[in-house]
């Protein structure tokens, strides 16, 4: 019998980044989001790996919906990836989605 996912597990498994319209596209302002509970798996040992991820960007036409970002970041928990690889993937995914005026991702 297949395991039935709890609603939180299902939400993380189906996580997709969502963009919203920027409420102030005529302004240059910075959004900084710190996510101190980032986890993934070490690609060498398989042990859980912990980090803080910080995203800082100046939006253009779109901003990221925070709940979707939280679920997206939690989707890395079962992934064997280095922090460098994770930071670069997060950067690429946010760059593609938002096309911000500037973007920094720190792991």
Image: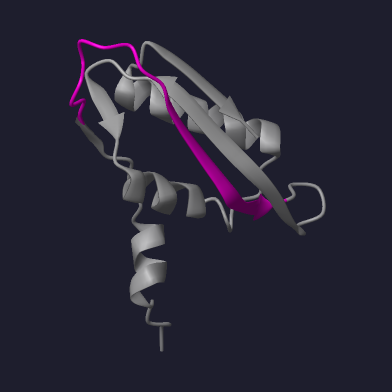
- Residue 62's place in the image compared with 42, above or below, is above
In depth, the one of 63 and 16 nearer the eye is 63
The structure residue drawn at horizontal position 41% and vertical position 83%, both measured from the top left corner, is: 2
Quarter of the image where the C terminus is located: top right
Region rendered in magenta: 21-41
Camera-side residue: 43 or 102? 102
Q: Residue furthest right?
A: 45
Visible in this render: residue 9?
A: yes
How far across and down, in percent of the image, does residue 64 sit?
A: 32, 35
Is 35 one of the magenta-colored residues?
A: yes
Asked where in the image residue 22 lies, by quadrant, the reply is top left
Screen quadrant of the N terminus: bottom left
Q: Is residue 46 magenta?
A: no
Q: Residue at the spot x=54%, y=50% of the render?
A: 76
Q: Nearer the viewer, residue 45 or 56?
A: 56
Q: Is residue 92 above or below residue 13?
A: above
67 sits left or right of 32 in the view: left
Q: Residue at x 26, y 12 (%)?
A: 27
Q: Quadrant of residue 24?
A: top left
Where residue 81 appears, as percent x and y from the top left, is 66, 43
What number of labels is visible?
0
User: Can see residue 75?
Assistant: no
């Amino acid at each position: 019998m297949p395991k039935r996912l709890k609603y939180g597990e299902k939400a993380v498994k189906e996580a997709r980044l969502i963009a919203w319209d920027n409420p102030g596209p005529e302004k240059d302002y910075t959004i900084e989001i710190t996510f101190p509970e980032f986890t993934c798996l070490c690609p060498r040992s398989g042990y859980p790996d912990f980090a803080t991820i910080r995203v800082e960007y100046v939006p253009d036409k779109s901003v990221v919906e925070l709940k979707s970002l939280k679920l997206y970041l939690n989707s890395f928990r079962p992934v064997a990836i280095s922090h460098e690889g994770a930071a670069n993937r997060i950067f690429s995914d946010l760059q593609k989605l938002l096309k911000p005026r500037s973007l920094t991702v720190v792991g």
